[in-house]
Image (cartoon, rainbow, N blue to C red):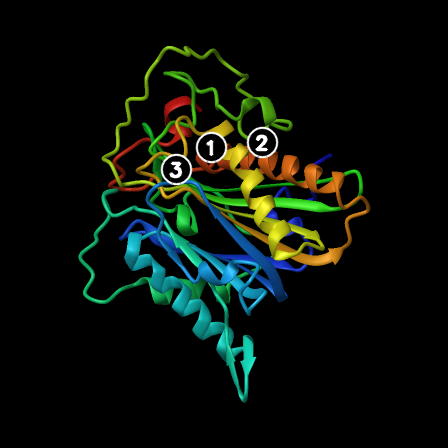
Amino acid sequence: MKPGKRNLITDVPGLKVGNASDAGIKTGATVLTGVKPFTAAVHVMGGAPGTRETDLLAPDKLVQEVDALVLSGGSAFGLDAASGVADGLRAQGRGFQVGDQRVPIVPGAILFDLLNGGDKGWSDNPYKALGRAALEVASDDFDLGSEGAGTGATVAGLKGGLGSASLVLDNGITVGALVAVNALGAVTMGEGPEFWAAPWEIGDEFGACGTGRHDPTEEPRPEAGLGENTTIAIIATDAVLTQAQAARLATAAHDGMARAIHPSHTPFDGDLIFAAATGVKPLPDPGFDALRLGHAAATCLARAIARGVHEAKPAPGDTLPTWQARFG
């Protein structure tokens, strides 16, 4: 396996990502969309999720494909970002056809970034506009760090951020990850710069700091308040997958979150992973290739989490330093 050309989730052909941010509020939204609808599924491991339209992602539901997936800040307010994306897709003539109407299918998930130093005194919910703005700039290339849904994200002791990574398997299938890292836990070891995800780093994509040392007897001492968290992610592939297979891919990808964030999947994080499959390439070996996809998804997600924090940028009013400011 090796990273794709961009080392982004958009190395999966046919997918695009858009970010929109509000520097004053310290928040934003990120959208993943495709040139055509794609199979999607979801798996939730955290104890405090915030979601929209995730029930329809079960294999027994009528709609089997979606038009976009949305990650947003703003806690429950941020769920409105998907409404803005739906409006934009409807204007493009996209959506599930019912009679002479088209209804865009846009599941979404949110993280909590309401106590990060930004001005949250809005009179009108800003997230619908942020969602539509993100859709309008969706492209193959996008920035990481303090962008989109990662704009106001934090982790234990540091700013969080938006991360992405990709891998091309030996069978030619591509897997990519997109994540907004906003965890109760830590992404670095102890007081040092080393990332928990270091064993899976490729080249120097998040600083090449080495693996560091871990004290297994140390108990977690979260710096954030309970409920102020959540890491939300998307795993994408160009493989042909059913919704059930996509759900298994999302489940396997949670291993990557556990590798990169300590602790992860806590009762106070809404940790959630969507899976997206564009259905271009059949699996040469449907049995064992499913295992390969799951391993690649976990590896990509661990790397993407570290990249998101590594690329975070400082901004006025920040409550925490960036990784670069502290260790760079």
First in sequence: mark 2 or mark 3? 3
CA–CA distance in space, label 1 to label 2? 9 Å
Numbered disc 2: secondary structure = loop
Residue at point 36% right, 29% down? 185
Q: Are marks 2 and 3 in contact (CB under 8 Å)?
A: no
Which of the numbered marks, if any, corresponds to residue 310? Answer: 1
Q: Residue at x 28, y 22 (%)?
A: 221
Residue 19 placement, left or right of 115: right
Judge from the rendering whether residue 4 lies leftward or rightward of residue 180; answer left or right: right
* Residue depth check, mark 2 versus mark 3: number of the one nearer the observer: 3
What's the amino acid at mark 1?
His
* Residue 283, numbered circle: none
* SS for dot 3: loop
Mark 3 lies on residue: 160
Whether pointer 1 and pointer 2 mark residues with C-beta atoms closer than 8 Å, the reply is yes
Toward the viewer: 191 or 108? 108
User: Which residue, given by chain and number where applicable, does mark 2 sit on?
Assistant: 205
* Quadrant into which the N terminus falls: top right
Q: Is residue 110 above or below residue 221?
A: below
Please report the residue visible at 30 percent of the width from the left and 49 percent of the height from the top. 26
Disc 3 residue type (three-letter): Gly
